[in-house]
Amino acid sequence: MDILFVPFLTDTQNGFSRVKLCAQARAVENECYVAIAGSVGNLPKVHNMDIQYAQSAVFTPSDFAFPYDGVKAQTTPNTEMILIADINLDDLRELHNFGSVKNLKDQRKDVYEVKRIHKVE
């Protein structure tokens, strides 16, 4: 996976923080980009949707070719905005082969194996 897209809807800063921190963890663990996009503002005539809290962002792995804090781009918190970010997929290939941590190459295949289960129709 190169990019994980995470749409979300949260109504508090606490809920948003859970989404953000988990998304950043997935970017580091899976050595990929993670783009999060949430709803902001309010929908007063929609039941249980009177307010939302969000901040859209693009997160990166944590290594030398990427921003020191793992944040490629982000919007202003809780403000309606469009986020545009340029990413370089070649940076991921470089990371997978020459990064300071090689999560994908250092798998312990002697301890576990990944099995693909095919859905029977």
Image: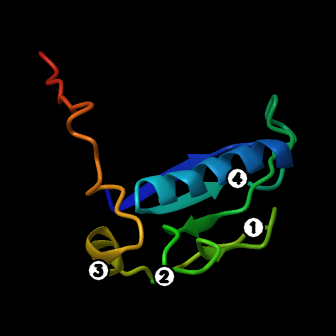
Residue 57 locus on image (x, y percent): 62, 66
Q: Secondary structure at mark 1?
A: loop
For discs 2 and 1, the disc positioned in front in the rendered view: 2
Q: Which quadrant of the view contains residue 43?
A: top right
Q: Residues within 10 Å of mark 2 (few under 14, many from 20)?
A: few
**What residue is disc 1 on?**
80
Residue 8 vertical placement versus 70 (above, below): above
Mark 4 or mark 1: which comes first in sequence? 4
**What residue is disc 3 on?**
90
Circles 4 and 2 in contact, beta carbons < 8 Å: no
Circles 4 and 3 in contact, beta carbons < 8 Å: no
Q: Secondary structure at mark 3?
A: helix
Mark 3 or mark 2: which comes first in sequence? 2
Is residue 12 among what the camera can see? no
**What residue is disc 4 on?**
39
Label annotation for residue 64: 2
Q: Residues within 10 Å of mark 4 (few under 14, many from 20)?
A: some
Q: In the image, what residue type sits under mark 3?
A: Asp
Is residue 2 among what the camera can see? yes
| Spatial separation of the CA atoms under disc 3 and disc 1 | 31 Å
Residue 98 locus on image (x, y percent): 30, 76
Identity of the residue drawn at 50% across and 59% down: 28
For discs 4 and 3, the disc positioned in front in the rendered view: 3
